[in-house]
Image (spheres, helix red, strand yellow):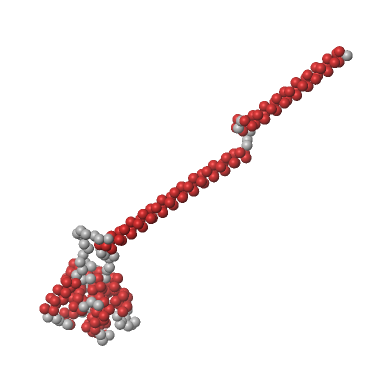
Amino acid sequence: MKRAKKLRLISKERFNRDRFWKILSYTIMEAERREFPSSVRGESNEEEEEEEEEEEEKEENKEEVKMEEEEEEEKKKLTRRIVKRRRWEQLVVSKLKWELSAVTPGDFLIHILSRLPVSGTWDHMMILRHAQTFVALSAREYKFSMYTPSMIAAASIAAALHGLDWTGKSGFGLAGLFDELTRITAIEQDYLRGCLEQIEEMVSQVQGGHVNGDGNANGDTGVDGHQVVSMSVSSGQQRPLGEQTTSQEKVIEHEKAGTPTDVRDVHF
């Protein structure tokens, strides 16, 4: 009896000891799983890694959006500063009455030609090309600086039409052409005649120089082989010397003042 009782006690102690060690091992494993990361435990936790990557991507996206918003704000500020500065510049220029828009004779050619009674049988593009040639040649001569762009454009149109013998074939004549140009541009005929004489003289000199140089009247001047040299107003309608002098004096009086450089009093 005693021996059997003793054996039961020993087996009960063994069972309790084994159970104790099992519970202790399980408790330690749970503690490690909770307190230490998977890298320390040697276990892979893909869900946690994916969550961390998503959070990092969100943070990067937030930073990118913030940087883009800052760039847009800087652009808006810069645009506002440029617009404000431009408005101030326009205000100052308007108060000083400075003319900054460059008006050239070429701006008037189409408008003048379209208002002249030139029939559709005539090649308008050829007339326009000849007038543009005269305008280009006049830009190299200082003598035309005393004429306004509209005067040079009207005289160039007159030179092109007269050189193509439109004045003779249409029955208008040079006087009728000047009347039409005066009606369109409101420029006195004395100015137009003086400018046209300067264009004749310039073209004659250019063509004469090329004839003396290489025997070619057309050369590289851009002037076509139309009757420019023969369109002399001074030979067809010769005027006294006194009237020519008066025309030049009127042109000088009509000369526009340049941009002011000495500004003392500016009232806004």
Question: Vertical placement of 140 versus 238: above or below?
Answer: above
Q: Position of residue 108 (x, y in %)?
A: 29, 73
Q: Position of residue 144 (x, y in %)?
A: 20, 70
For residue 49, side relative to residue 130 (left or right): right
Question: Vertical placement of 240 versus 26: above or below?
Answer: below
On-image quarter of the C terminus: bottom left
Viewer-side residue, 89 vs 176: 89
Find residue 162 and report its image quarter: bottom left
Find residue 24 and report its image quarter: top right
Find residue 100 and report its image quarter: bottom left
Q: Residue at x 41, y 54 (%)?
A: 76
Viewer-side residue, 44 vs 130: 44
Count of all numbered marks drawn on residues in the image: 0
Which residue in the rendered view is the most extreme toward the bottom?
171
Q: Residue at x 70, y 26 (%)?
A: 25
Which residue in the rendered view is the most extreme toward the top?
2
Question: Vertical placement of 37 versus 83: above or below?
Answer: above
Q: Is residue 147 visible?
A: yes
